[in-house]
Image (spheres, rainbow, N blue to C red):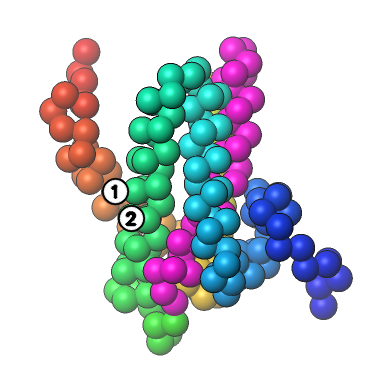
Amino acid sequence: MDDRPNDDSLQSRMIRAAGLDPALYDEVKRDPVATRQAFFVVVLAAIATGIGFGQGDLQLIVLGMLFALVGWVLTAYMSWVIGDRIFPESEPRSSPARLLRTIGFANSPAIARLLAVIPDVSMFVMALTTVWVLFSTVIAIREGLGYRSMLRATGVFLALQLMMVPLALLLAGPEGVSTD
């Protein structure tokens, strides 16, 4: 039995998500109110990334937020299609909304990117938070899809990445890919 108090505040949930707590991801997938919180997590993570990496330009931060929100929705929907429709563990039992919530909270570790304003640690912070978000996303996929297997969730994540790379290159266009 879990002895923790049920604190559904945004701050508490973000801390638990960053701590890779599977129970948190299971909790938010079942709580429709958490969709709004997940939205705020994605926005806060995008702002932290923009500030942390010296993009104090408000236009770039807003653009980063828009890309983060579109990426969040695409990641949730594509994870649902891959994991619940193409490779379900048993009978399908998830929804895009559940994955929006879990994957939104998986961005919680990206708040630490604010520390990238410190020049000597910025690359370390970026690497650490990227790996941290990847791990939390796999947990979010597992819990959002109701999988028992972390390996299966990792497979969905890898399939998702294989689908996202061509999409990102397409969106970047020829000017976005430099060989210089």
Disc 1, SS: helix
Task: For the N terminus, give its image quadrant.
Answer: bottom right
Residue position marked by numbered label 2 in the rendering? 74
Q: Residue at x 35, y 40 (%)?
A: 67
**Residue 9 pos. (x, y %):** 71, 57
Is the residue 180 above or below the residue 150 in the image? above
Q: Specify few, some or many for label 1: CA neighbours under 10 Å numbering under 14, 14-19, or 20 or more.
A: some
- Residue interval drawn in magenta: 94-122
Q: Name the amino acid, label 2.
A: Leu
Disc 2, SS: helix
Camera-nearest residue between 133 and 156: 133
Q: Residue at x 45, y 61 (%)?
A: 100
* Quadrant in which residue 38 is drawn: bottom right
Task: For the C terminus, give its image quadrant.
Answer: top left
Q: Residue at x 59, y 71 (%)?
A: 31
Camera-nearest residue between 68 and 135: 68
**Residue 56 pos. (x, y %):** 48, 19
Q: Name the amino acid, label 1.
A: Met
Which numbered circle lies on residue 48? none
Q: Specify few, some or many for label 2: CA neighbours under 10 Å numbering under 14, 14-19, or 20 or more.
A: some
**Residue 5 pos. (x, y %):** 83, 67
Give the overall secondary structure of the magenta segment: helix
Residue position marked by numbered label 1 in the rendering? 164
Mark 1 and mark 2 in contact (Cβ < 8 Å)? yes
Residue 145 visible in the displayed image: yes
